[in-house]
Image: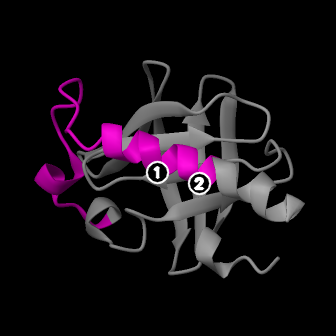
Amino acid sequence: MLRQLMYGWPMALLAAIAVSAAEPSTAVTDTPQQAGLPCCSNSALANRVWLQTSKEAEPGALRIFLANGTMLLASDVASPAIEQWLCTQGRLYLIEQGIRYSADILQLTETVLTLQLEHPAGSTVLSFVAADQIIY
């Protein structure tokens, strides 16, 4: 029961955020649907819950890339955030706290997502597994 409460509340919260974020954001002018690039049109990326498995990840860290360009972030230790993602000029971009980071998709399957995120201090590899693949 305790495990259900621990893992159930973030999902309920994210579902509520997703409903409120259903309207396309006006801050991003090149949404994934408009770009039509392989990194964005792949249904394996969008509208799925991705749990971060990188060793530097916060406990319970997850991302949801909604098809409208909204990116939902949550973890057990940080407040949930509504951010953005887009593809333009052949690149995937994650926009967090108003800062645009470019990312290469190193691996994308139905169960695994690996990104190489470029930032001013260098690059970081972020690994994720699809939440529906987790067995508790």
Residue 29 among those drawn in magenta = yes
Q: Secondary structure at mark 2?
A: helix
Q: Residues within 10 Å of mark 2 (few under 14, many from 20)?
A: few
In the rendered structure, which amino acid carries the disc numbered 2? Met
Q: Nearer the viewer, residue 38 or 56?
A: 56
* Disc 2 to disc 1: CB gap under 8 Å: yes
Residue 14 among those drawn in magenta = yes
Quadrant into which the C terminus falls: bottom right
Quadrant into which the N terminus falls: bottom right
Q: Which residue is mark 2?
A: 11
The residue that appears at 60% across and 71% down in the rendered structure is 130
Residue situated furthest top in the rendering? 98
Q: Which residue is mark 1?
A: 15
Q: Secondary structure at mark 1?
A: helix
Considering only vertical position in the picture, is 116 above or below 43? above
Q: Quadrant of residue 54?
A: bottom right
Q: Position of residue 22 (x, y in %)?
A: 26, 44
Residue situated furthest front in the rendering? 1
Distance between the alpha carbons at the discs numbered 2 and 1 = 6 Å
Q: Nearer the viewer, residue 117 or 132?
A: 132
Is any part of residue 53 visible from this angle?
no
The segment highlighted magenta reads: 10-38
The residue that appears at 23% across and 23% down in the rendered structure is 27
The residue that appears at 24% across and 48% down in the rendered structure is 68
In the rendered structure, which amino acid carries the disc numbered 1? Ala
